[in-house]
Image (cartoon, rainbow, N blue to C red):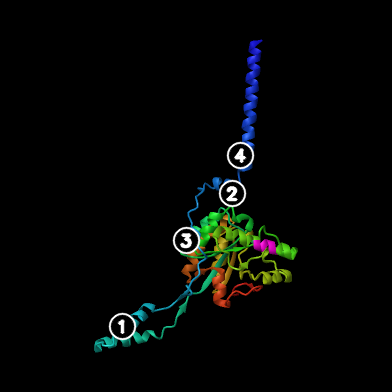
Amino acid sequence: MKIRIVFAVLLLAFVLDGFTACYKEIIIAQEFDEHAVDAAFAQLPVLPTIYETKPPQVYEYEPYITYTHKHESYEYEDYYKYEDYYEEDYYEYEDYYEYEEYEPIRRPMVALTFDDGPSKYTEYILDILEQYGARATFCVLGSRVEDWADTILRMNYLGSEVVGHSWNHRNFTRHNEDEIKRQILETSAAIEKVLGVPPPPIFRAPYGALNARVRRVAYELEYSILNWSLDTEDWRHRDADHLYNFIMERAIDGSIILMHDIRRPTADAMVYVIPGLIELGFQLVTATELIEYFEGELQPGVEYRGIR
Ligand code: ZN
């Protein structure tokens, strides 16, 4: 009899233990978010926030204009202060004069744009941008901003640009004005909450889909619309070599290139695309820098597609 009771108690304890363990797992499963699981699988360390908030980089002077013989020019300026030059020095001035024939040179520029992120591949793209001192534009989904706050901060920290790409990738042309406004403004608010400053007044519509209503809302909210000149269709090909060849063959001065930082092959291709474009003489700038250079200050309600 006693043995039976002891056995029954042990059995009960065993069952209860199993139940609590199971219950704990359910709780843990509920607390897991998909990004943390993704990060764990990719064996990426979850880093603490180390990037300080700083305002978007506003350059006093176009950073993408370079002048040949700038150095000599300064030498001349300095030299000229000394009025009492000797005759032999005068010849140096004559030598300098030849440089006057050189015109300022502007290196051609392209804007790489990455949609639908951030994702676990975005930091990898940022690593490569940082390595080459290049900038890009990230068109982020508002719903992902909070989870990827550190990545958003790092984009800004590296001089790249963060703009909205709707809250949850709704096709704006199928929604009313209120919903379009909500999608644009709430995404901007989420970005501002992370960066401490609002993003530039420009958004990229999901699928690039526009109609008169979307344009009118953009105009009313004083936002510009960012589209592209080169659609790589990286989401369809999912092939790093194809993406590399596509961009190398087609990039021209003023290209705005559409890609997605939620695709592994896209991130892989950047290892070759970014140094490859620089090798070809391009400078990698943000979309608004490119637009402002070619088309002047951003205008509300206007769609920008780069140079074709
Ligand atoms: Zn998209």
Question: Which is more foreground, mark 3 or mark 4?
Answer: 4
Image side of residue 199 versus residue 93, left or right = right
Q: Earlier in the sequence, mark 3 or mark 1?
A: 1
Q: Earlier in the sequence, mark 1 or mark 4?
A: 4
CA distance separating discs 4 and 2: 15 Å
User: Which residue is identified by label 2?
Assistant: 35
Between residue 145 and residue 88, name the one nearer to us: 145
Q: Is residue 251 visible?
A: no
User: Which residue is identified by label 1?
Assistant: 79
User: Which residue is identified by label 3?
Assistant: 130
Amino acid on which disc 1 is placed? Tyr
Question: Which is more foreground, mark 3 or mark 1?
Answer: 1
Q: Do the numbered discs 3 and 4 sit on residues whose CB atoms are within 8 Å?
A: no
On residue 28, the disc is 4
Looking at the rendered structure, the secondary structure element under dot 2 is: helix
Q: Earlier in the sequence, mark 3 or mark 2?
A: 2
Looking at the picture, how far across and down is residue 155, in whole percent? 52, 60
Image side of residue 260 versus residue 180, left or right = left
Residue at horizontal 53 percent and vertical 54 percent from the top:
150
